[in-house]
Image (spheres, rainbow, N blue to C red):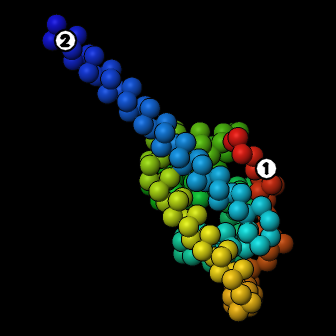
Amino acid sequence: MNHFACLLCLFVFVTTSIVASSDDRQRAEKQVRRITAMATDKTGRRMVSMSIADSFKMPRPDLVEERRRIGLDYGSFFVAHQLVATGVKMTEIMSGLKTGKTIWEIADEHHADWRRIAADAKKQNSKIEDYIYRHFLNKKNDVVYKDRAPTEKYDIARDAVRSDFNVRSDQ
């Protein structure tokens, strides 16, 4: 009888863990889709690139070139860098993508911490929303952003990949 009780407890624990992990992944996907959606037009993409470059402490031209080389939308790029921060090599991510896997499948293979990714993506979205708000708040901020682009040598025309425009609400 004790063995049965232990097995039952183990089953309940595993089932609960799987459901919690699934919920965390869904929350992460929702937040990451928001990052991707905000980058579908030029103004949004400019704000998303600034906030992600600032968060990752990368020069924007480097961010743009890496994103173009990998071919990921900003949301997937964010997840890729979350994986890199936990020790996954970018070459592993790129080889997985070349074999047809999605960033989500690659993240699952590497046992991604979906709760942390969801929390970090939520913070990133808040930062992006703040940048967008300040952009439209008044003309002074627009001038500041336009001044930033030449010093960073940021080119909005180069900052686009095919997957930027494949945003669906049901993904």
Q: Residue furthest left?
A: 2
Quadrant assignment for the N terminus: top left
Residue 11's mark? none
Q: Residues within 10 Å of mark 2 (few under 14, many from 20)?
A: few
Q: Which residue is mark 1?
A: 166
Q: How many marks?
A: 2
Answer whether residue 110 is visible to the viewer in this image: no
Three-letter amino acid code at the position of disc 2: His
Q: Is residue 39 left or right of residue 7?
A: right
Which residue: 77% across, 61% down?
40
Give the percent coordinates (x, y) of residue 111.
46, 41
Three-letter amino acid code at the position of disc 1: Asn
Residue 70 vertical placement versus 43 (above, below): above
Which residue: 80% across, 65% down?
41
Q: Residues within 10 Å of mark 1 (few under 14, many from 20)?
A: few
Q: Is residue 4 left or right of residue 99?
A: left
Quadrant assignment for the C terminus: top right
Give the percent coordinates (x, y) of residue 77.
63, 58
